[in-house]
Image (tube, rainbow, N blue to C red):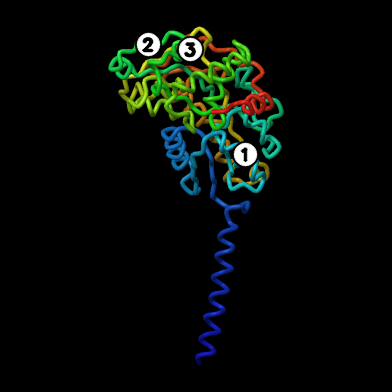
Amino acid sequence: MRKATKLMLSMLMVVMTVLALCACGKSNDEDSNKVVIYSGAEEYRNEYFLKRLKEQFPDYDITIEYMPTGNLAAKLAAEGTQTDMDIFYDLDFSYAGLVEKYLADVSSYDQSIYVDDCKVPGGHYLAETRNGGAIIINPDVLKAKGIAEPTCYEDLLKPEFKNLISMPNPKSSGTGYMFVKSLVNVWGEEKAFEYFDKLAENILQFTESGSGPVNALVQGEVGVGLGMTAQAVTAINDGANLKLLFFEEGSPYSLYGYAIPKGKETRKAVKDVFDFFYSTLVREDKELFYPEQVFVEQENKVANYPTNIKYADMSNNTTDEKKRLLENWEH
């Protein structure tokens, strides 16, 4: 009797193990309803996307994991087609080139809806965001310190700004890199890097993500941030006392996209979610959060968003150029 019981228990354990293994592999099966999205977008945008996706696809198991854009590119470059991500969102174009060989062909999606610089040659990812930057200040912090508002980049080198400036690290943040690239284009590489070497003396912290400077400004930890226009406007609309400044060199900007790692495009759940981003969510993202021009027909409705923005020269913003410049970044 004991032997029979032990045998039955052993057989039960084997069955349970097999079922568990099957369940673990299920997420990669064609019929799996699980969709894992990695996103470099801010928390409030990811929360909105997840809410809308769950409304649209109540039977799908959808998760959105935040990851800074540089880390997201590094993850996909390291894992290739074996990655656990089914879709990525908000990856800087200059990083996307690094992982393009691991991306599914999405050239069947109509790109005539995009303005010219948002059309992606090769069709392995699609545009979704134009992320413009600004010099953002907290007037209360500067007033308390008796510091006048800066009027140009050179003003930020003044000793009174020491430990009062926040900037994203260009090695981990597309937002940080776009400030570097814009000044390299207008001043030349040598002068631009000399400037950032001096600016580093006044920076309290190089943040890992592009969200860091605005968060520090809202908390009153710094008085100046090199950050995202859209995130600053969102904070202003939430009641923060921030002000956006645009210097003579213009607003730097990056273009961001979304894609499917190669091999995941055959799964119905993944394609359904990607289609919904294309048809609906990307446009809602522009209407609610990031209204700078991506689509030919696009009406911007975000309150307090700057108009007639003068953009910086962001030419030659390629993957190879980014890699080369960041090899010389020492902070």
* Residue 322 in picture, x, y percent from top left: 64, 25
In the image, is residue 7 above or below residue 104? below
Q: What whole-number distance in Å separates the C-alpha atoms at marks 3 and 2?
A: 11 Å
Q: Secondary structure at mark 3?
A: helix
Q: Residue at position x 53%, y 41% from top? A: 37
Query: Which residue is under mark 2?
Result: 149
* Residue 229 in picture, x, y percent from top left: 45, 20
* Residue 259 in picture, x, y percent from top left: 61, 35
Amino acid, disc 1? Ile
Amino acid, disc 3? Tyr
Q: What whole-number distance in Å separates the C-alpha atoms at marks 1 and 2?
A: 44 Å
Query: Which residue is under mark 3?
Result: 153
Q: Residue at position x 52%, y 22% from top? A: 131
Q: Quadrant of the C terminus?
A: top right
Comparing 294 with 58, the one in front is 294
Q: Residue at position x 47%, y 40% from top? A: 53
Amino acid, disc 2? Glu
* Residue 261 in picture, x, y percent from top left: 64, 41
Q: Residues within 10 Å of mark 3 (few under 14, many from 20)?
A: some
Query: Which residue is under mark 1?
Result: 260
Say whether disc 3 or disc 1 marks the residue closer to the N-terminus.
Answer: 3
Q: Which mark is residue 185?
A: none
Q: Residue at position x 56%, y 21% from top? A: 178
Q: Residues within 10 Å of mark 1 (few under 14, many from 20)?
A: many
